Image: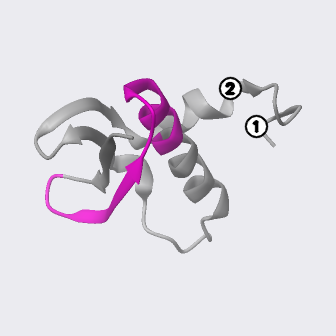
Amino acid sequence: MPRFYVSFEDDSSVWSVAEMDCPDDDAACDCAVQLLSELFARMHDDAPDWSRCRIRVAGTPGADILVSSAAQAALVERDQFHPAAGIRTDH
């Protein structure tokens, strides 16, 4: 299974980097956006402002397949219905 690299960053810092194995580019992007959505949902009031960061998914280091603002990615995830779970993520 291919390995993908995910980072959450802004212009001056990289806050989080992860590696994950996913079947394809679409699954890797979906998984990264879901992870980011979970981070947004669990943030405390005094947490850093993640809305100014970017999410980046690469198939190999430097080969980006997704670069999006974190806020936009979280909104996309929030608005998706997950039929397997039978729930929406916009709780």
Of marks 2 and 1, which one's residue comes earlier in the chain? 2
Residue at 37% across, 27% down: 25
Residue extending farthest to the bottom is: 46
Measured Cα–Cα span from mark 2 to mark 1:
6 Å
Q: Position of residue 1 (x, y in %)?
A: 39, 41
Residue tagged by mark 2? 79
Quarter-wise, where is residue 69 in the image?
A: top left
- Helix, strand or loop at label 2? It is loop
Residue extending farthest to the right is: 86
Taking 45 as reference, is 8 above or below it?
above
Q: Which mark is residue 20?
A: none
In the image, 46 versus 22, the foreground residue is 22
The type of residue carrying mark 1 is Asp
Magenta range is 11-32
Left or right, residue 64 beside residue 39: left
The type of residue carrying mark 2 is Asp
Neighbour tally class for label 1: few under 14, some 14-19, many 20 plus, Cα within 10 Å: few
Residue at 30% across, 66% down: 15
Taking 41 as reference, is 64 above or below it?
above
Quarter-wise, where is residue 55 in the image?
A: top left
Q: Which mark is residue 90?
A: 1
Q: Position of residue 10 (x, y in %)?
A: 23, 53
The answer to the question of whether label 2 and label 1 lie on touching residues, with beta carbons closer than 8 A, is yes
User: Is 27 one of the magenta-colored residues?
Assistant: yes
User: Is 13 one of the magenta-colored residues?
Assistant: yes
Left or right, residue 44 beside residue 73: right
